[in-house]
Each structure stands twice: as structure tokens, then as C-alpha cells.
Image (tube, rainbow, N blue to C red):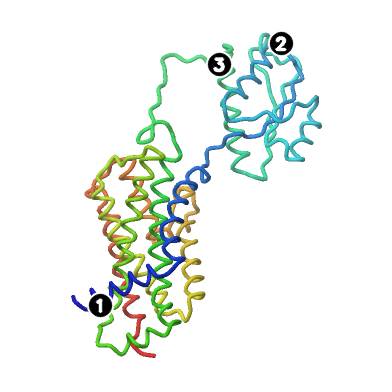
Amino acid sequence: MKALRYLLEKEFKQIKRDRFLPKIIFIMPVLQLVILPFAANFEMRNIYIGIVDNDHSVYSQRLTEKIISSGYFKLTDISSGYKEGLASIEKDRSDILIEIPADFEKDLGKEGKAQVLIAANAINGTKGGLGSSYLSTIIQDFNNECGYGVRMTGSITSKNLYNPHLNYKNYMVPGIMAFLLTLIGGFLSALNIVSEKEKGTIEQINVTPLSKSLFLLSKLIPFWIIGFILLTIGILIAWLIYGLIPAGSFGVIYLFAVIYLIAFTGFGLAISSISSNQQQAMFTVFFFTIIFALMSGLFTPVSSMPEWAQKLTLFNPLRYFIDVMRMVYLKGCRLSDLSVHFSVICLFAIFFNALAVIGYRKSN
């Protein structure tokens, strides 16, 4: 234990003496947690819309006002004809075009129905698809308000469980907190042993009677402590900026964070042990981190991925930790509800740290 204390003292002094590393450790995660939930939002707002009103009636004006007042669309073009409106899409002035035909009000009053044309720029498939869906819903609501919609007996009420206001930030923030722990655990630990190699100090350590496990433990513990500090800062930011408080227990979050940090710092050390220089270690971790992030469900649901990709996500530790954070924050899940996730993350921790021990050799 005395040797471990001296090794930990050495590690913390190295981190403190580095002018750049402490700033990266604390400033970068905080800025990402503050900025990314606002930027990584798949709710479409301010979709540029062009309108071609060939009717110029009271009803066509009411439909136009309803579309603009919805908050989803921003009127950027009013054209006199379809070809002119299509040109606004081609010039990127509009994302979606709606054409209201002549006799729109007359057809509604006489036949109880009328057709409108929706043309969407599908280069951005997400914006085009969601924009068209929003617009179709607004038109249907307008149709019902005018009394021409399908009449139904009874009523339908909907209730959104766990996220009643459909606030996308409530979904993103817990996932981003998990991703930040991945960056800290993976990148910083991956640079640790390889930096000793470049400085030449690894040779001095190798001739000491220290065991491999004790040496690797001294490399892991500082990043566990830093990870806990950053997680606590992230929880405070989620509360202060987004008003997000876990529906479940803080103890469950920290318990999973312990196991996850053990897993991912072991992953970083395994890469560091087999890398010859910091550049090699950095690119290797970057490669795996990008794959882990894209296939974790952080930005797109796992259920929407192809079947082969869904099977690959089963080998992604980040997927399980993001699920845990969201389930504890939004659903209030307890440890008994997350037993499968706990077992899988423990297996990853054992596997990655075994690789780190095997990969590190006390020889030149």
C-alpha cells in the first residue's frame, strides 16, 4: 500500500504539472455538456417553407397562418406559381413548398374536401420527412377545425410517459454524460503508459520490483477519481441548466459509473500498452470511440438500425451505460431492474483490464 501511495502521488503531480491536460480534463467536458444538448437536437424547428396560394381566400389565409404559428415553420418565400416556388427550393431558400390550389375554399364548402400539394427537399431526408409529417398533421388539424374532418364518437387522450413534455434535452443529457466518461476513461488512460515510454521513464519503472497489477492500478485510480468529479459536475450542470434530476437513485448512477470507468480505463490502458507512441494510441482510441458513439443509441435509436448493426451493438459497452443513465434519470429504474446491464458492464471491465495486464510487459 505504501508503494501504491507513492505511485499515486507521482501520477497526480504529473497531471498537475501538465499545463494543457487539466484544462482539457475539466473545461472540455463542461462545454460539451452545456453546448451539445442544444446542438444535437432532432426536433425540427424553423423549417423554411415556401407558399404558393392560388386561391387567396379566407380559408387559404387561415391555413397559412396556422402553419406559420405552429412554431415549426418559417415563411421564407411566397410565390405566384409552382415553378417559381420550386426554384426557391433549388436555390435553398425553402425546404418545403406547399401549393394551395385555386377554388380551395369553394371545394371545401361544396365537396367537403380539397387537395394541396406538398413538395419537400429530400437532400436532407430527416428534415424533409419530418417537415412533411408536421405539415400533414397541421393540415389535418385545420381540416377538423373547419368541420370537414372525419367525425368520431368519444375522445382520444394521450399521455407521454417518463418525458411528458417530449423535451429532447431530457433524452440527450444523460447520454452525453455517459459519453463524456467514455472520453475521459478512454483517451486519457490511453495516453498514460505510452507517454512514459516516450519520456523514457517506463524503463526505470520496469527495473523496480513493482508488480504489473500494482503499477496498472496506480495508472487507473487517478482517472477513476477524475471521472467521479466530472460525473458530479455533469449532474450539477444537468440540474442547474436543464432542470434535470434523476427519477431514480444517485447511488445506482455512481455504482454503474464505478464499473464503467474501470472497464473503459482498462480499455485505454490496453491500447496504451501495445502502442509505440502517443499518436498511435490517440488514433486507435479515436477509431474505437467513434464506432462506440455511433452504435450506442446516443444519437439514433438502436431499434432503427439494421439488424446486423443491432447485433454489433451488443458488444458496445457505451450502449449499456447510456441505457442505464436514461433509465435511471427518466424512468427511475432501480438496480434490480438493471441487473442485465450490470452483469454485462462487469464482464467488459474484466475483459478490458485482463487485456491491459496481458498487454503490458515489464521488459524492453
Q: Report helix, strand or loop for mark 2.
A: helix
Q: Report helix, strand or loop for mark 1.
A: helix
The residue at which mark 3 appears reads as 144
- Of residues 236 and 37, which is closer to you in this image? 236
Disc nearer the start of the sequence (1/3)? 3
Residue at point 22% right, 79% down?
A: 3
Residue at point 38% right, 69% down?
A: 15
The residue at which mark 1 appears reads as 214
The image shows residue 78, relative to residue 257, as above or below, that is above
Disc nearer the start of the sequence (2/1)? 2
Disc nearer the start of the sequence (3/2)? 2
Whole-percent x, y for residue 337 in the image: 25, 47
Is residue 335 left or right of 223 when viewed as pictured? left
Q: Amino acid at mark 3?
A: Asn
State the CA–CA distance, disc 3 to disc 2: 17 Å
* The residue positioned farthest toward the top in the image shown: 110
Number of other residues with Cα within 10 Å of mark 1, as a class: few under 14, some 14 to 19, many 20 or more: some
